[in-house]
Image: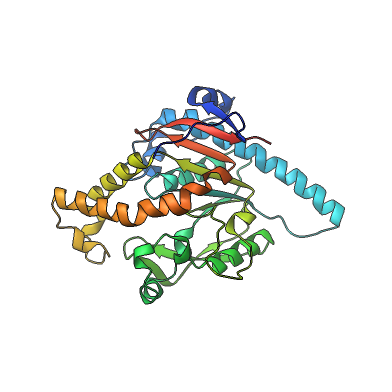
Amino acid sequence: MTIEPLTPFSPYTRLTRAEWARLRADAALTLTPEDVLRLQGLNERLAMDEVVAVYLPLARLLSLYVEAERVLYRARATFLGDATAKVPYVIGLAGSVGVGKSTTARLLRELLARWPEHPKVDLVTTDGFLYPRRILEERGLMGRKGFPESYDRPRLIRFLGDLKAGQSPLSCPVYSHLTYDIVPDSTVTIEQPDIVILEGLNVLHVASDRPGEARVFVSDFFDFSIYVDAPEADIRHWYVERFLLLRATAFKEPESYFHRYAGLSDDEAERTAGTIWDTINGPNLRENILPTRERAHLVLVKGSDHRIDEVWLRKL
């Protein structure tokens, strides 16, 4: 699968890395090399020049959008005589397993929180809104974990509805990648944030698999959305590479759901990871995630080295 070029009638403005980097303007770099090392993914080699060239312009753009939205919100509130407390600006961040969207989300949270206005920025992942493993097993969905039907979408939509209604504090369920399950009786509190980044595989998905289900979607609550993109062959390679690293680290923990893979040889681990990709993550990408790319306000296009090569920004 290759990334198709934009047509003359595309809704996006296509910017090369160099063109995008110039849009940083005078935005100051507030992260240290130690910060970047802490924020990068397990098998990503994130350089400072990537932060400067790609993520600082993106943080600047988002800050401008947030301020413009505040002006619009105040105007609307004045018109309606609405005294509702401030509501957060919600950024949706989508992309495949293994593409690096979690690193993007963490970087944006840090950069936006350190902007001169010092907004309060919270990061929420949709992993916490997966059904517990017990329910997935009962419904025969363990082999489709990460597909749209494996999420408690009504609960996620209620959370976003409450968030956009100005309710605070709000609680989010907690997911453990170690146990591959929701952590019982554990929540994270979200309290009066200025910005919320919601990161997940299918946050731009709009199809419903339930007849008669209300046509309200997660993305209806977004003020801005980002899709992290790369050719599938590269993402598959990164996924296998990460699996091998986890085999030597987290999988060795006795309580790990994937502990049974810790003793695999290199060849066995590569074959296992490839099979998981080919039967679960690859089909999910092609069927449910990639088709939502053109719904995003901005697309970050990666090359085989994880660096952003292009940025597509939706025209107004």
Q: Is residue 52 above or below residue 193?
A: above
Question: Which residue is found at the position 56% from the left and 31% from the top?
Answer: 7
* Horizontal and vertical percent position of residue 22: 55, 23
User: Taking 205 as reference, is 215 left or right?
Assistant: right
* Horizontal and vertical percent position of residue 260: 19, 63
Tell which of 258 and 145 is nearer to you.
Answer: 145
Tell which of 269 and 6 is nearer to you.
Answer: 6
**How does the figure colour the protein chain or chains?**
rainbow
Quadrant including the N terminus: top left
* Horizontal and vertical percent position of residue 257: 27, 65
Specify whether residue 116 is in view. no
Q: How many marks?
A: 0
* Horizontal and vertical percent position of residue 247: 22, 53
In the picture, residue 84 is in which quadrant?
bottom right
Q: Residue furthest bottom?
A: 138
Tell which of 176 and 96 is nearer to you.
Answer: 96
Specify whether residue 134 is in view. yes
Q: Is residue 211 above or below residue 304?
A: below
In the picture, residue 147 is in which quadrant?
bottom left
Question: Which residue is found at the position 31% from the left and 52% from the top?
Answer: 278
User: Taking 221 as reference, is 30 left or right?
Assistant: left
In the picture, residue 192 is in which quadrant?
bottom right
Quadrant including the C terminus: top right
Question: Which residue is found at the position 36% from the left and 51% from the top?
Answer: 282
